[in-house]
Image (spheres, helix red, strand yellow):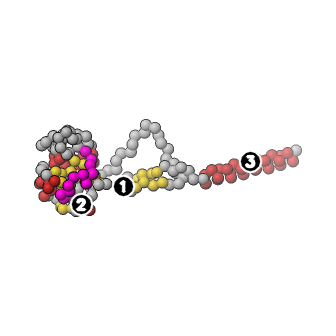
């Protein structure tokens, strides 16, 4: 009887060892990592970390804006698709300078009403030093938009075109101002 108990204990030890080795092998293998995005920092892949996807889960809210310019960009983004109407300054339709003025007002700053006056106020910024929220002038100052980052500007371009995000290079750059 003692030999049977001994054999059972040996078998149990072998099975437990095999399971432990299998578990170590399974956890040591690289897992398919989902990229992790940290707003304002970047996207990272961390081996062995898998973020479960929950179907129908709401997206995380945008990080809070830190500067007046960031807040103006976020306000302007809410008006993407709004109609262009000459002379309109929101909240439902806009011309170019009306959109800029409205977005900055949402951020707590009053800007001049016309594109020419917007191009003359604030501090000058070179195209190479643009930051999100800078007011960009085009066509000799007759058109304005808000720099949104990544080479794009949010603007109300012309009749028949809604407020949109467009490459800054799609129009002749005239200057930029920071408020």
Tell me the mark number nearer the camera, choosing from 1 and 2. 2
Q: Is residue 99 left or right of residue 13?
A: left
- Whichever of labels 1 and 3 marks the residue nearer the N terminus, that label is 3
Disc 1 and disc 3 in contact, CB within 8 angstroms: no
- In the structure shown, which secondary structural element does the residue marked by tag 3 occupy? helix
The residue where tag 1 is placed is 40
**Residue 127: mark in rendering:** 2
Q: Position of residue 57 (x, y in %)?
A: 43, 39
Q: Nearer the viewer, residue 175 or 17?
A: 175
Image location of residue 11, percent across then percent down: 78, 47
Q: Nearer the viewer, residue 162 or 13?
A: 162
Q: Quadrant of the C terminus?
A: bottom left
Q: Residue 152 placed where, x, y %?
A: 28, 52
How many C-alpha atoms fall within 10 Å of the one at disc 1: few (<14), some, or many (≥20)? few
In this view, which residue lies farthest toward the top?
A: 56
> Does 169 appear in magenta?
yes
Q: Quadrant of the N terminus?
A: top right
Indicate whether residue 87 is drawn in magenta: no
CA gap between label 2 and label 3 equals 68 Å
Which residue is label 3 attached to?
Answer: 15
Q: Secondary structure at mark 2?
A: helix
Q: Nearer the viewer, residue 167 or 91?
A: 167
On the question of residue 74 being in view, the answer is: yes
Residue at point 21% right, 62% down? 125
Mark 2 Cα-neighbour bin, 10 Å: few <14, some 14–19, many ≥20: some
Residues tagged 1 and 2 counted as in contact (Cβ below 8 A): no
Crowding at dot 3, Cα within 10 Å, few <14 / some 14-19 / many 20+, comes out as few
Disc 1/disc 3 C-alpha distance (Å): 49 Å
Q: Position of residue 18 (x, y in %)?
A: 71, 50
Which residues make up the magenta segment?
164-179
Marker disc for residue 66: none
Front of the two marks 2 and 3: 2
């Amino acid at each position: 009887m003692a030999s049977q108990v001994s054999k059972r204990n040996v078998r149990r030890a072998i099975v437990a060892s095999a399971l432990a080795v299998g578990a170590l092998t399974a956890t040591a293998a690289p897992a398919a990592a989902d990229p992790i995005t940290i707003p304002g920092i970047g996207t990272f892949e961390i081996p062995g970390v898998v973020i479960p996807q929950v179907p129908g889960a709401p997206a995380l809210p945008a990080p809070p804006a830190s500067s007046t310019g960031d807040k103006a960009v976020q306000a302007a983004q809410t008006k993407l698709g709004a109609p262009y109407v000459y002379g309109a300054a929101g909240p439902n339709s806009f011309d170019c300078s009306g959109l800029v003025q409205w977005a900055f007002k949402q951020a707590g700053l009053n800007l001049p009403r016309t594109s020419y006056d917007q191009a003359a106020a604030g501090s000058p910024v070179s195209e190479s030093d643009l930051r999100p929220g800078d007011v960009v002038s085009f066509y000799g100052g007759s058109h304005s938009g808000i720099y949104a980052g990544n080479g794009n500007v949010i603007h109300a371009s012309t009749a028949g075109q809604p407020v949109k995000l467009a490459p800054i290079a799609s129009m002749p750059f005239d200057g930029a101002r920071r408020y």
